[in-house]
Image: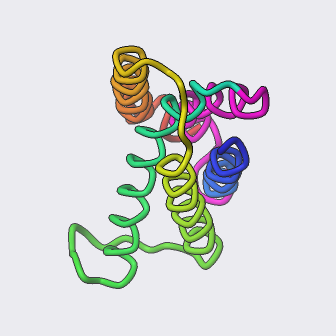
Amino acid sequence: MAFCCLAILMALYVVGAVRHGVLRNIVQTLPLWVPIVLGFRGNEFAKWSALPCLIIWLAAMMIVWLLVFRWVYVQSWHFSTTEIAMTFIAGVASAVGLGIAFHWRTVVRPLSAGAVTLLFGALQFLALWASLPPAVAHR
């Protein structure tokens, strides 16, 4: 689980370095640090903190792929080969992480698991929203 989240984080940092500066991607990936640390420590809450992040990042990568393959047209966007490769890495890492999460049985109580999942879903959306202002997006 930790390696999947770390792969997503690193791929997004590479995209930031190639595209527009890494600050935006640092802000976007802040919630991933918790499941990375918990996962390397073997804590079962790694699953529940990673689950919403993995779902959101897989959905984001799928949207990018729709744009890359021109199945959806929003505006004329250009993606470099590096960016496309990194979206593939992040998407595969998200899918593999979800597979691991769905097979990982934990003894975490359902109420605690649900609360952590909702919290990290909200944190991931907040991080994405916080990365949108130009002061963050272009640094």
Residue that sits furthest to the left in the current view = 73
Q: Residue 24 placed where, x, y %?
A: 54, 38
The chief SS type of the magenta part is helix
Q: Residue 74 placed where, x, y %?
A: 21, 67
Tell me which residue sits at (42%, 23%) in the image: 113
Tell me which residue sits at (44%, 74%) in the image: 78
Q: Residue 125 placed where, x, y %?
A: 35, 32
Image-based side of 116 in relation to 114, left or right: right
Which of 16/61 is in front? 61
Image-based side of 73 in relation to 43, left or right: left
Q: Residue 23 placed where, x, y %?
A: 61, 35
Q: Which image quadrant is residue 33 in?
A: top right
Which of 7/40 is in front? 40
Quadrant containing the N terminus is top right
Tell me which residue sits at (53%, 25%) in the image: 107
Total marks shown come to: 0
Quadrant containing the C terminus is top right
Image-based side of 75 in relation to 33, left or right: left
Image-based side of 63 in relation to 89, left or right: left
Q: Is residue 122 depicted above or below 88 in this figure?
A: above
Q: Within the magenta stretch, is there residue 36?
A: yes
Q: Within the magenta stretch, is there residue 29?
A: yes
> Which span of residues is magenta-colored?
17-42
Q: Is residue 40 depicted above or below 96 in this figure?
A: above
Q: Colour mode?
A: rainbow
Tell me which residue sits at (52%, 36%) in the image: 50
Q: Is residue 3 depicted above or below 118 in this figure?
A: below
Which of 15/35 is in front? 35
Q: Is residue 81 depicted above or below 49 in this figure?
A: below
Which of 26/30 is in front? 30
